[in-house]
Image (cartoon, grey):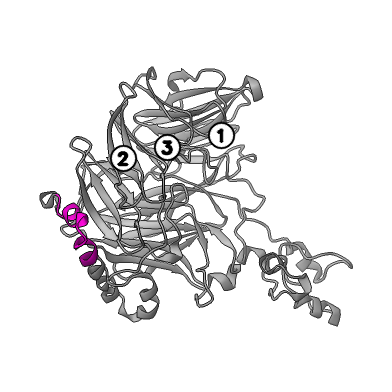
């Protein structure tokens, strides 16, 4: 979710946590204590790290008293020491062997509780314990994950959308024991034993290998594995399965099939949650389920001139309606009663807008694109759905990834943070390491304050917590550590929250491409697509997640 240059190594404190894998860890983490000493002694960083020691509190998050089915709301407090120690080091082993050196596997969803980090990878959810990087549970969903929500209940549950189980292409052929003459293999299915010519062909490389190496098919080295073991492209099945999952145990508490949702695709379906309710929208319908047992509360699958373009949840529930097509297309934003689906208010977006995105439900913030190439304006609405203000976004000035289609259609503007009265945007770096975060007053749409990166590394906002903005800052030179910093919206003061380094195998941390999550005083970095580590000496693993915590 953020930007940064080639990465430095980690710390001796991290090496001490996992000495058994010292050789591999050397490539990732090496001597943060030494790095910090070097960096802090350089001058400005010493003042930055010591800017406000009084603000370093107990590690973790102050729990707000909430009902179990309420959407979690924690207040993060800075660790007593900002020096990061390893909490989770998740590597997807044998990745290159299973999927191919140049393959990528979608990894939608990163969540954390007080005990567990959870990742969605392909059609699997995996839970990892803190301190040992041990995989404590793994849940096969039955189909690829196609929609997640960042929202988690106070007692650690979240909702996941996934595709229907896919029938293997050779299931019918197994009944006959052989294929018809001249029939080609599909999706990498293994050929049955037969003539020598068949065996010879069986040794030839797969198309995936051809693409990787640029050689003829008969020179490849693929093993003809079933495609589901070497590629993660969503199967041609609708995204109709919804489950509520306990993040500490991996248990599916309930699972339902969406009604009349055969046209629900991964890029047009999204799931979100409000208190006690899980809600799903796809292009021609929407439905809501009781969080306790999965009972359907309401559904809207009737043909209409206005389709569903997505939902935004949290403390309130918003829906984006898309009406008409092409030049006559218009948009409406509605607040719904989550238990009945009834509209409480409606805001009609002005005509001529090509695309609309729900950035936030509370406050209600809508991103609009007039030219269709990116966000032109952010519209703020009040609690009754009335227009409040406009924040202008001149082309090329600010980072926005709202219209990047990945998993779901709303609540995905990773570089925009909104709270009751303020909104925060990051400018695009003028050079790789210089940018600023700008805060706006949502009552007026005017700039309130600018937080300069001052060449320490480009930064972008993550979340508001306890009245302070947490932001990710990449390393400026590959020697100084990466960091999550705390910014005071009132005074402009910047203090370190956690200092660490992202391993090179994780790739650059960019908005929209990487999840950066702060929960319980810990910071988690997780790419949204897994790829094998680069380099000839790499072990063929893919970096899945990094978790760090303070002293």
- The magenta region covers 36-51
* Mark linked to residue 398: 3
At label 3, counting other C-alpha atoms closer than 10 Å, the crowd grade (few under 14, some 14-19, many 20 or more) is: many
Disc 3 to disc 2, C-alpha distance: 33 Å
Name the residue carrying label 2.
Answer: 70
Residues tagged 3 and 2 counted as in contact (Cβ below 8 A): no
Task: Give the side of residue 468 with respect to residue 511, left or right.
Answer: left
Residue at x 21% of width, y 39% of height: 492
Name the quadrant of the C terminus: bottom left
Q: Which of the two residues, 543 or 152, is positioned nearer the viewer here?
A: 543
The residues tagged by marks 1 and 2 sit, at their Cα atoms, a distance apart of 37 Å
Secondary structure beneath label 1: loop
Toward the viewer: 300 or 542? 542
- The correct choice, above or below, for 277 with respect to 46 in the image is above
Q: Main secondary structure of the magenta part?
A: helix
Q: Of the numbered discs in the image, which one, if any, rests on residue 373?
A: 1
Tell which residue pokes out farthest to the left in this image: 54
Asked if the residue under mark 2 is in contact with the one under mark 1, i.e. CB atoms within 8 Å, the reply is no
Q: Nearer the viewer, residue 166 or 4?
A: 4
């Amino acid at each position: 979710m953020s930007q940064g240059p080639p990465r430095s190594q980690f710390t001796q404190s991290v090496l001490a946590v996992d000495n058994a894998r010292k050789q591999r860890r050397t490539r990732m983490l090496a001597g943060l204590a030494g790095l910090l000493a070097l960096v802090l002694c350089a001058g400005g960083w010493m003042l930055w790290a010591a800017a406000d020691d009084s603000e370093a509190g107990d590690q973790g998050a102050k729990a707000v008293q909430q009902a179990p089915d309420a959407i979690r709301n924690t207040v993060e407090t800075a660790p007593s020491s900002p020096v990061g120690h390893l909490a989770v080091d998740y590597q997807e082993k044998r990745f290159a062997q299973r999927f191919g050196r140049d393959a990528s596997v979608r990894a939608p969803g990163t969540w954390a509780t007080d005990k567990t980090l959870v990742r969605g990878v392909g059609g699997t959810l995996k839970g990892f314990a803190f301190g040992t990087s041990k995989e404590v549970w793994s849940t096969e969903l039955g189909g690829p994950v196609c929609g997640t929500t960042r929202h988690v209940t106070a007692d650690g549950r979240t909702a996941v959308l996934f595709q229907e189980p896919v029938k293997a292409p050779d299931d019918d052929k197994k009944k006959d024991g052989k294929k018809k003459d001249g029939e080609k293999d599909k999706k990498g299915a293994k050929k049955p034993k037969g003539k020598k010519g068949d065996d010879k062909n069986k040794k030839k490389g797969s198309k995936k290998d051809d693409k990787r190496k640029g050689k003829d098919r008969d020179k490849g080295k693929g093993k003809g594995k079933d495609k589901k073991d070497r590629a993660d492209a969503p199967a041609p099945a609708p995204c109709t399965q919804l489950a509520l999952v306990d993040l500490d145990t991996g248990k599916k508490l309930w699972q339902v099939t969406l009604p009349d949702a055969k046209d629900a695709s991964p890029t047009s379906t999204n799931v979100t949650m409000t208190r006690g309710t899980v809600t799903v929208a796809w292009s021609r319908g929407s439905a809501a389920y009781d969080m306790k047992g999965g009972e359907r509360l309401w559904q809207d699958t009737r043909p209409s001139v206005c389709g569903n373009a997505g939902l935004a949840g949290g403390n309130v529930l918003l829906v984006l309606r898309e009406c008409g097509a092409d030049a006559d297309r218009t948009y409406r934003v509605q607040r719904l009663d989550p238990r009945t689906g009834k509209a409480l208010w409606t805001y009609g977006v002005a005509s001529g807008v090509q695309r609309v995105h729900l950035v936030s439900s509370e406050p209600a913030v809508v991103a609009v694109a007039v030219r269709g190439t990116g966000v032109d304006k952010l519209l703020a609405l009040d609690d009754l759905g009335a227009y409040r203000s406009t924040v202008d976004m001149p082309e090329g000035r600010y980072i926005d990834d709202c219209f990047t289609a990945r998993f779901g259609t709303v609540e995905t503007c990773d570089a925009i943070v909104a709270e009751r009265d303020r909104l925060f945007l990051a400018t695009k770096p003028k050079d790789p390491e210089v940018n600023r975060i700008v805060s706006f007053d949502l009552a007026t749409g005017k700039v309130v304050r600018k937080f300069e990166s001052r060449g320490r590394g480009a930064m972008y906002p993550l979340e508001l917590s306890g009245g302070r903005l947490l932001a990710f800052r990449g390393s400026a030179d590959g020697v100084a550590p990466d960091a999550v910093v705390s910014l005071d919206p009132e005074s402009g003061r910047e203090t370190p929250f956690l200092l660490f380094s992202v391993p090179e195998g994780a790739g650059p941390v960019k908005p929209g491409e990487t999840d950066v999550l702060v929960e319980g005083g810990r910071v988690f970095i997780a790419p949204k697509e897994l790829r094998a580590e680069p380099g000839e000496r790499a072990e063929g693993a893919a970096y899945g997640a990094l978790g760090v915590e303070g002293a």
